[in-house]
Amino acid sequence: MANFLLIGSALGALVGLLHAVHLFRQISPRAKASGVPGGRTQGIYYGLTAFVLWSLFGSYVLALWFVGALAYPIVYMARRWKRAERAI
């Protein structure tokens, strides 16, 4: 379980870093163009918030990805079976 939490947090940190960079690059120029004071600070704040949240909830998101990856084929096969049953 500890390894799962560590891997989930590491993946969350990686995705969070990418999301933080994306948010910073989107928000900073818009804030400067609109004349909001501290536009770069606002971009850093949004990026840092995204990074922290992804790092905190990375394990939770990883667990949901696993559940989805396991449930999807089961639901897909059940739907195909149900459709085949109706056709008879």
Image (cartoon, helix red, strand yellow):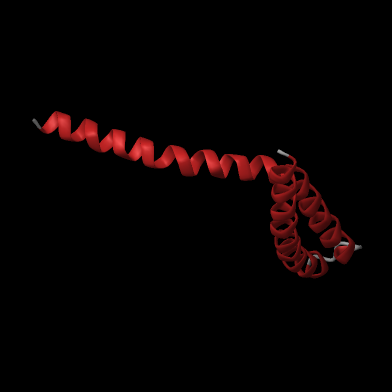
Asked if residue 62 lies left or right of residue 34, the reply is left
Q: Residue at x 77, y 49 (%)?
A: 55
- As drawn, which residue projects farthest toward the left? 88
Residue 42 in the figure: left or right of residue 3: right
87 left or right of 47 in image: left
Task: Please tell me which residue lies in front, 2 or 38.
Answer: 2
Q: Position of residue 4 (x, y in %)?
A: 69, 44
Estimate the x, y position of residue 71 in percent, counting from the top left.
Answer: 44, 37
Residue 31, located in which quarter of the rendered image? bottom right
| Total tally of numbered discs in the picture | 0
* Between 22 and 75, the one nearer to me in the picture: 75
Residue shown at the point (61%, 40%) measured from the top left:
63
Quadrant containing the C terminus is top left
**In percent of the image, x 36 and y 35: which residue is there?**
75
Whole-percent x, y for residue 72 in the image: 41, 41
Name the residue rendered at 70%, 46% in the picture: 58
Figure quadrant of the N terminus: top right
Of residues 25 and 66, which is closer to you in this image?
66
* Rendered position, 47 above or below 84: below
Q: Residue 65 occupies which quadrant of the picture?
A: top right
| 75 up-or-down from 11: above or below | above
